[in-house]
Image (cartoon, rainbow, N blue to C red):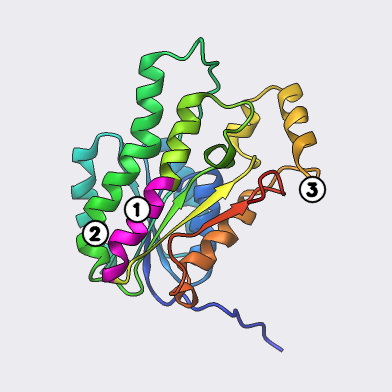
Amino acid sequence: MMNKSIFTFGRRTAVITGGSKNIGLAIALRFAQAGMQVAIVSSNKGNLLHASQLFDTEEYPASIWECDISKTHTIDPVLKDICEQHGSIDILVNCAGILDLSSIEDTAEDTWDAVLDVNLKAAFFMVQKSLPFLKNGSYPRIINISSNAGRMGGYANGMSYTASKGGMIAMSYGLARKLAPFSITVNCVAPGTIESDMSRSRNWEAQRQLIERFPLGRIGTADEVAYAACYFASIESSFTTGAVLDVNGGLFMG
Protein backbone atom coordinates (compact mmCIF):
# COMPACT_ATOMS: atom_id res chain seq x y z
CA MET A 1 0.00 0.00 0.00
CA MET A 2 1.39 3.40 -0.98
CA ASN A 3 1.94 5.82 1.90
CA LYS A 4 0.05 9.10 1.68
CA SER A 5 0.99 12.18 3.66
CA ILE A 6 -1.65 13.49 6.06
CA PHE A 7 -0.58 17.03 5.07
CA THR A 8 -1.34 18.92 1.87
CA PHE A 9 1.12 21.39 0.37
CA GLY A 10 0.13 21.99 -3.24
CA ARG A 11 2.27 23.49 -5.96
CA ARG A 12 3.10 26.56 -3.90
CA THR A 13 6.35 28.53 -3.86
CA ALA A 14 8.47 28.90 -0.73
CA VAL A 15 11.23 31.48 -0.35
CA ILE A 16 13.81 30.30 2.19
CA THR A 17 16.52 32.65 3.43
CA GLY A 18 19.64 30.88 4.60
CA GLY A 19 18.37 27.92 2.61
CA SER A 20 21.71 26.80 1.21
CA LYS A 21 22.96 24.85 4.26
CA ASN A 22 22.08 23.30 7.61
CA ILE A 23 18.48 23.86 8.83
CA GLY A 24 17.53 26.04 5.87
CA LEU A 25 18.70 23.45 3.36
CA ALA A 26 16.87 20.67 5.21
CA ILE A 27 13.66 22.73 5.08
CA ALA A 28 14.16 23.42 1.38
CA LEU A 29 14.64 19.71 0.65
CA ARG A 30 11.56 18.63 2.64
CA PHE A 31 9.42 21.30 1.00
CA ALA A 32 10.60 20.20 -2.44
CA GLN A 33 9.94 16.55 -1.62
CA ALA A 34 6.41 17.59 -0.65
CA GLY A 35 5.89 19.00 -4.14
CA MET A 36 6.46 22.68 -3.52
CA GLN A 37 8.66 24.98 -5.57
CA VAL A 38 11.61 26.32 -3.61
CA ALA A 39 13.60 29.53 -3.97
CA ILE A 40 16.79 29.47 -1.91
CA VAL A 41 18.24 32.84 -0.90
CA SER A 42 21.79 33.10 0.47
CA SER A 43 24.77 35.44 0.39
CA ASN A 44 27.26 32.58 0.08
CA LYS A 45 28.08 31.58 -3.51
CA GLY A 46 29.75 28.32 -2.56
CA ASN A 47 26.83 27.15 -0.47
CA LEU A 48 24.39 28.13 -3.21
CA LEU A 49 26.35 26.10 -5.76
CA HIS A 50 26.33 23.07 -3.49
CA ALA A 51 22.58 23.41 -2.91
CA SER A 52 21.94 23.80 -6.63
CA GLN A 53 23.89 20.65 -7.42
CA LEU A 54 22.01 18.73 -4.73
CA PHE A 55 18.61 19.80 -6.04
CA ASP A 56 19.63 19.04 -9.62
CA THR A 57 20.68 15.54 -8.57
CA GLU A 58 17.35 14.96 -6.82
CA GLU A 59 15.46 16.61 -9.73
CA TYR A 60 13.54 18.90 -7.39
CA PRO A 61 12.09 22.23 -8.58
CA ALA A 62 14.31 24.87 -7.01
CA SER A 63 16.04 28.11 -7.88
CA ILE A 64 18.95 29.84 -6.15
CA TRP A 65 19.36 33.55 -5.51
CA GLU A 66 22.44 35.33 -4.24
CA CYS A 67 21.43 38.17 -1.94
CA ASP A 68 22.77 39.74 1.25
CA ILE A 69 19.42 40.38 2.93
CA SER A 70 21.04 42.52 5.63
CA LYS A 71 21.32 45.12 2.84
CA THR A 72 17.57 45.55 2.66
CA HIS A 73 17.56 47.53 -0.61
CA THR A 74 18.62 44.32 -2.41
CA ILE A 75 15.54 42.35 -1.35
CA ASP A 76 12.85 43.82 -3.63
CA PRO A 77 14.49 42.91 -6.98
CA VAL A 78 15.12 39.34 -5.86
CA LEU A 79 11.53 38.80 -4.71
CA LYS A 80 10.17 40.23 -7.95
CA ASP A 81 12.39 37.91 -9.99
CA ILE A 82 11.41 34.91 -7.87
CA CYS A 83 7.71 35.63 -8.37
CA GLU A 84 8.23 36.11 -12.09
CA GLN A 85 10.08 32.80 -12.41
CA HIS A 86 7.85 30.68 -10.16
CA GLY A 87 4.51 32.42 -10.64
CA SER A 88 3.85 33.18 -6.96
CA ILE A 89 5.33 33.54 -3.50
CA ASP A 90 3.17 31.70 -0.99
CA ILE A 91 5.53 30.91 1.89
CA LEU A 92 8.40 32.83 3.45
CA VAL A 93 10.85 31.07 5.75
CA ASN A 94 13.20 33.38 7.65
CA CYS A 95 16.07 31.04 8.46
CA ALA A 96 19.16 33.13 7.71
CA GLY A 97 21.20 33.70 10.83
CA ILE A 98 24.66 34.12 12.27
CA LEU A 99 25.91 33.02 15.68
CA ASP A 100 27.83 35.09 18.21
CA LEU A 101 29.65 33.38 21.08
CA SER A 102 31.12 36.53 22.64
CA SER A 103 31.01 37.07 26.37
CA ILE A 104 29.13 40.10 27.64
CA GLU A 105 32.42 41.83 28.39
CA ASP A 106 33.91 41.11 24.96
CA THR A 107 30.89 41.87 22.74
CA ALA A 108 31.86 44.51 20.19
CA GLU A 109 29.36 46.99 18.85
CA ASP A 110 29.97 45.97 15.25
CA THR A 111 29.35 42.32 16.19
CA TRP A 112 26.08 43.26 17.88
CA ASP A 113 24.99 45.25 14.83
CA ALA A 114 25.95 42.50 12.37
CA VAL A 115 24.03 39.80 14.25
CA LEU A 116 20.90 41.92 14.72
CA ASP A 117 21.05 43.06 11.08
CA VAL A 118 20.96 39.51 9.73
CA ASN A 119 18.95 37.69 12.37
CA LEU A 120 16.20 40.21 13.07
CA LYS A 121 16.20 43.35 10.92
CA ALA A 122 16.54 41.44 7.66
CA ALA A 123 13.79 39.02 8.71
CA PHE A 124 11.37 41.89 9.29
CA PHE A 125 12.11 43.51 5.95
CA MET A 126 11.83 40.16 4.17
CA VAL A 127 8.30 39.99 5.60
CA GLN A 128 7.51 43.58 4.71
CA LYS A 129 8.70 43.25 1.13
CA SER A 130 7.07 39.83 0.65
CA LEU A 131 3.63 41.03 1.73
CA PRO A 132 2.40 42.13 -1.73
CA PHE A 133 3.10 38.60 -2.99
CA LEU A 134 1.86 36.75 0.08
CA LYS A 135 -1.44 38.64 0.06
CA ASN A 136 -2.05 37.18 -3.40
CA GLY A 137 -0.62 33.77 -2.49
CA SER A 138 -2.25 30.42 -1.89
CA TYR A 139 -2.57 29.60 1.82
CA PRO A 140 0.14 32.16 2.64
CA ARG A 141 2.55 31.37 5.44
CA ILE A 142 5.41 33.06 7.27
CA ILE A 143 7.68 30.72 9.24
CA ASN A 144 10.39 32.25 11.41
CA ILE A 145 13.28 30.18 12.74
CA SER A 146 14.20 31.36 16.22
CA SER A 147 16.19 29.44 18.84
CA ASN A 148 16.04 28.03 22.32
CA ALA A 149 18.22 31.03 23.18
CA GLY A 150 15.25 33.26 22.42
CA ARG A 151 13.10 31.22 24.80
CA MET A 152 15.33 31.00 27.86
CA GLY A 153 18.55 32.88 27.16
CA GLY A 154 20.68 29.95 26.09
CA TYR A 155 23.94 28.92 27.74
CA ALA A 156 26.98 29.35 25.51
CA ASN A 157 25.78 31.92 22.97
CA GLY A 158 26.42 35.66 23.07
CA MET A 159 23.83 38.26 24.01
CA SER A 160 23.46 39.61 20.48
CA TYR A 161 22.29 36.18 19.34
CA THR A 162 19.96 35.82 22.34
CA ALA A 163 18.46 39.26 21.72
CA SER A 164 17.96 38.61 18.03
CA LYS A 165 16.22 35.27 18.58
CA GLY A 166 14.05 36.61 21.40
CA GLY A 167 13.12 39.45 19.09
CA MET A 168 12.20 36.95 16.39
CA ILE A 169 9.66 35.31 18.71
CA ALA A 170 8.18 38.65 19.80
CA MET A 171 8.02 39.80 16.19
CA SER A 172 6.24 36.58 15.21
CA TYR A 173 3.52 37.28 17.79
CA GLY A 174 3.05 40.82 16.53
CA LEU A 175 3.02 39.84 12.87
CA ALA A 176 0.54 37.04 13.54
CA ARG A 177 -1.96 39.56 14.94
CA LYS A 178 -1.37 42.18 12.27
CA LEU A 179 -1.53 39.79 9.30
CA ALA A 180 -4.41 37.57 10.44
CA PRO A 181 -6.97 39.72 8.54
CA PHE A 182 -5.16 38.74 5.34
CA SER A 183 -5.27 35.01 6.26
CA ILE A 184 -1.48 35.02 6.46
CA THR A 185 -0.37 32.80 9.33
CA VAL A 186 2.85 33.56 11.15
CA ASN A 187 4.52 30.91 13.26
CA CYS A 188 7.91 30.22 14.75
CA VAL A 189 10.14 27.18 15.22
CA ALA A 190 12.58 27.42 18.14
CA PRO A 191 15.29 24.76 17.83
CA GLY A 192 17.65 23.77 20.57
CA THR A 193 21.21 22.88 19.65
CA ILE A 194 21.17 21.25 16.21
CA GLU A 195 23.90 19.46 14.28
CA SER A 196 25.16 22.31 12.11
CA ASP A 197 28.08 24.60 11.34
CA MET A 198 26.96 26.70 14.31
CA SER A 199 27.08 23.82 16.79
CA ARG A 200 30.37 22.58 15.38
CA SER A 201 31.90 26.04 15.89
CA ARG A 202 31.89 25.32 19.63
CA ASN A 203 34.75 23.29 21.09
CA TRP A 204 34.08 19.70 22.12
CA GLU A 205 33.92 20.46 25.83
CA ALA A 206 31.28 23.14 25.25
CA GLN A 207 29.31 20.69 23.08
CA ARG A 208 29.53 18.01 25.77
CA GLN A 209 28.29 20.37 28.45
CA LEU A 210 25.37 21.39 26.25
CA ILE A 211 24.37 17.79 25.52
CA GLU A 212 24.30 17.03 29.25
CA ARG A 213 21.58 19.66 29.69
CA PHE A 214 19.18 17.99 27.23
CA PRO A 215 16.69 15.60 28.87
CA LEU A 216 16.74 13.47 25.69
CA GLY A 217 20.52 13.22 25.95
CA ARG A 218 21.45 14.41 22.49
CA ILE A 219 21.35 17.38 20.15
CA GLY A 220 18.86 17.50 17.31
CA THR A 221 19.07 17.16 13.55
CA ALA A 222 18.23 19.68 10.86
CA ASP A 223 15.56 17.31 9.53
CA GLU A 224 13.76 17.35 12.88
CA VAL A 225 13.44 21.12 12.57
CA ALA A 226 12.42 20.83 8.91
CA TYR A 227 9.52 18.54 9.73
CA ALA A 228 8.23 21.11 12.23
CA ALA A 229 8.38 23.75 9.48
CA CYS A 230 6.45 21.39 7.20
CA TYR A 231 3.48 21.45 9.57
CA PHE A 232 3.38 25.24 9.59
CA ALA A 233 3.65 25.29 5.77
CA SER A 234 0.85 22.78 5.28
CA ILE A 235 -2.66 23.75 4.28
CA GLU A 236 -3.91 21.83 7.32
CA SER A 237 -2.20 24.32 9.68
CA SER A 238 -4.58 27.10 8.63
CA PHE A 239 -5.94 27.68 12.17
CA THR A 240 -2.48 27.88 13.75
CA THR A 241 -0.91 31.33 14.01
CA GLY A 242 1.26 33.04 16.60
CA ALA A 243 2.60 29.67 17.76
CA VAL A 244 6.14 28.74 18.79
CA LEU A 245 7.05 25.09 18.29
CA ASP A 246 9.99 24.05 20.45
CA VAL A 247 12.23 21.42 18.88
CA ASN A 248 14.81 21.22 21.63
CA GLY A 249 14.94 17.77 23.25
CA GLY A 250 13.14 19.00 26.34
CA LEU A 251 15.67 21.70 27.28
CA PHE A 252 12.90 24.31 27.47
CA MET A 253 9.40 23.31 28.50
CA GLY A 254 6.78 25.98 28.83
Q: Quadrant of the N terminus?
A: bottom right
Q: Residue at x 29, y 52 (%)?
A: 127
Nearer the N terminus, badge 1 or badge 2? 2
Q: Tell me which segment is drawn in magenta.
A: 170-182
Residue that carries the numbered disc 2 in the rendered image: 131
Characterize the magenta stretch by its predominant secondary structure.
helix
What amino acid type is highlighted by mark number 3?
Answer: Leu
Cα–Cα gap, marks 2 and 3: 39 Å
Q: Amino acid at mark 1?
A: Gly
Between 17 and 207, the one nearer to me in the picture: 207
Image location (x, y in percent) of residue 220: 69, 47
Numbered disc in front, either 1 or 3: 1
Residue identified by numbered label 3: 216
Q: Are marks 1 and 3 in contact (CB under 8 Å)?
A: no
Q: Secondary structure at mark 1?
A: helix
Nearer the observer: mark 1 or 2; the answer is 1
User: Residue 213 or 233: which is nearer the viewer?
Assistant: 213
Instruction: Locate residue 79 relative to residue 221 in the image: left or right.
Output: left
Query: Residue 67 in magenta?
Result: no
As drawn, the residue found furthest toward the front would be 254
Q: Position of residue 202 (x, y in %)?
A: 65, 25
The residue where tag 1 is placed is: 174
Considering every residue shown, the one lying at the far top of the view is 105
- Between the C-alphas of marks 1 and 2, the distance is 15 Å
> Mark 2 packing: few (<14 Cα in 10 Å), some, or many (20+)?
many
Helix, strand or loop at label 2? It is: helix
SS state under label 3: loop
Decide which of tag 1 and tag 3 comes sooner along the chain.
Answer: 1
Separation of disc 1 and disc 3 at Cα?
Answer: 32 Å
Q: Residue at x 60, y 52 (%)?
A: 246
